Amino acid sequence: MSADGVCPDQTAVWSELGTLVPRERFQARLREVGGAGPAIAVADLGASYRVTAAGRVRLYRDEARDCAERARVAALFIGLAIDPADTVAAAAPPPAPPTPQQARPSPTRPLPPPETPPLLEVQVGPAFDVGLGSGNTGFAPAGLVGLAVGRGVVAALVAIAADLPADASAGSVRVRQWRAPVSVGVRARLARARVEPYAELGLAAGPIVARGRDVVSPSTAVSLELGVAAALGVRLGGRTGGFLVARGELVPDPPEVFAFPAGAAGHTARFWIGAAAGVSLEAR
């Protein structure tokens, strides 16, 4: 081998060749292809280098002048030119032995069918309502039953809330009242997962019963309350789980409350806010 220049060094090229081809076989092959001049030559040309082997010439560009990498590339080119069979076998890494899991054929398992969204969802639980506006503030414990029907993202909704009798105020008069609004609307499921947020919007209508207190002649009045209801909630668990929801209702024209002898004493609440929590059941 002749080497013109110092990058790559002749010794480094021979060392790399020794890892690719057995030295005795390479020397024998080298004698077979030898001619009048050197069978192998490496020339350092600065930003590039030229490798000659068995009449084949290859010019490589290497501006970084990585001499170790030049020696590896030159040795591989020389080995392929002189003894390609042994060089290819030495350059290719042996295949990794199979792991025990790979060695054993795994049984073919059919994919599970996709889960069908529920057709029916029922929610039952305790709740509370707070009435605000129109001079009326009151807190009432309640119960909530909700029914959602539909497999898609949007489902039809019917919900019934029943407030227990509670004290409130209408103007300057104390009253005892209870209400049972029924909401009809839609529920939008925001994600199908173990934790499923949802939103509801609909119309609410139901009776509200008020009876004056601390007046000369108390009387009971039954009125119809009409409003717009909305809610934000989250459902937890699978077919049998729980739920937590915050609710609100706007009554644009709340019913009047009359008390003898003052006459019209005020209105029932214009805003109702509340929350509920309980058990949620699904049916496919």
Image (cartoon, rainbow, N blue to C red):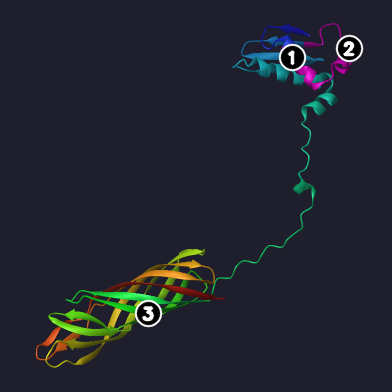
Q: Main secondary structure of the magenta part?
A: helix
Other-residue count near label 3 (Cα within 10 Å), few / some / many at <14 / 14–19 / ≥20 = some
Q: Which residues are magenta?
A: 12-40
**Mark 3: amino acid:** Gly
Helix, strand or loop at mark 2 = helix
* Quarter placement of the C terminus: bottom right
| Label whose residue precedes the other's in the sequence (3 or 2) | 2
Q: Tell me if 65 is positioned left or right of 195 in this view.
A: right
Q: Nearer the viewer, mark 1 or mark 3?
A: 3
**Mark 1: amino acid:** Val
Query: Residue at horizontal 82%, vertical 11%?
Result: 39
Can you tell which mark lies on residue 31?
A: 2
**Mark 2: amino acid:** Arg
Please name whichever residue, 7 or 230, is drawn nearer the observer in this view of the structure.
Answer: 230
Percent across and percent down for residue 277 are: 40, 72
Helix, strand or loop at mark 3 = strand
Q: Mark 3 highlights which residue?
A: 143
Q: Mark 1 highlights which residue?
A: 13
| Label whose residue precedes the other's in the sequence (1 or 3) | 1
* Quarter placement of the N terminus: top right
Q: Nearer the viewer, mark 3 or mark 2?
A: 3
Question: Can you tell which quarter of the image residue 212 is in?
Answer: bottom left
Helix, strand or loop at mark 1 = helix
Outermost residue toward the left? Answer: 261
As drawn, 86 above or below 15? below
Q: Tell me if 240 is positioned left or right of 86 in this view.
A: left
Query: Residue at horizontal 79%, vertical 11%?
Result: 40
